[in-house]
Image: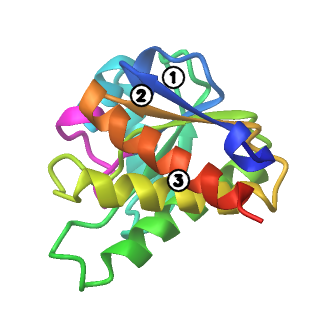
Amino acid sequence: MDPQTDRIQLHTGDITTLDVDAIVNAANPLLRPGGGVCGAIFQAAGRELEAACREAGPCPTGEARLTPGFNLPARYVIHAVGPIWRGGDAGEPEALARCYRNILSLCEAHRLTSVAIPAISCGIYGYPMDKAARLAVDTVAEGLAGQTFPRTVIFCLYDAAARAHYERALEAVAHLNRAP
């Protein structure tokens, strides 16, 4: 593995239980409570998160906002708005990559050493998991090459099938970086 992929880990489970500097919420543009990961984060963080999101929002697709974590083990929540999948020709890959770059920028700016990221846009937004995993790992590995923080990125995945996509993507990136 190269230094960037060494900083990337995979975890299967509940992102709201991870003791990291920040967890990422796969957010909607209004930063309102939603379903899936978003709903779980709002429920675990407590009512204060909703008020903080009203202050921080709205958040356009591809961008990210930082709020406190309130009742979460994580100190912060990074709310990142991924694209809705429309077939891949409506700028979705660019928007999703921008999302990951903005997450990394917030980590660097706030000197966050660890961040846990779910499979952004892969739930209700319909982004194909295989494509999203490769783009996520590629973008994060590339971004980590140019910055000190975060020192650890954990892709937190909800099941073994999702994790398998990220394992393949991580191996592909590590393999490319080992090639002469």
Q: Residue at x 41, y 21 (%)?
A: 16
In the picture, the quarter occupied by the N terminus is top right
| Kind of residue sitting beneath label 3 | Ala
Assess disc 2: are there few (<14), some (14-19) or many (≥20) residues with their C-alpha within 10 Å of its C-alpha: few
Task: State which region is magenta.
Answer: 26-37
Q: Residue furthest front?
A: 180
| Kind of residue sitting beneath label 2 | Glu
Which residue corresponds to mark 1? 70
The first of marks 3 and 2 along the sequence is: 2
The part of the image, by quadrant, that contains residue 94 is bottom left
Q: Residue at x 38, y 49 (%)?
A: 54
Which residue corresponds to mark 3? 172
Estimate the spatial distance between the alpha carbons at disc 3 and disc 2, rounded to whole Å.
41 Å
Which residue corresponds to mark 2? 48
Estimate the spatial distance between the alpha carbons at disc 1 and disc 2, rounded to whole Å.
7 Å
Instruction: Tell me the SS state at disc 3.
Output: helix
Q: Position of residue 111 (x, y in %)?
A: 80, 42
Q: Nearer the viewer, mark 3 or mark 1?
A: 3
**Residue in the foreground of this view, choosing between 138 and 69:** 138
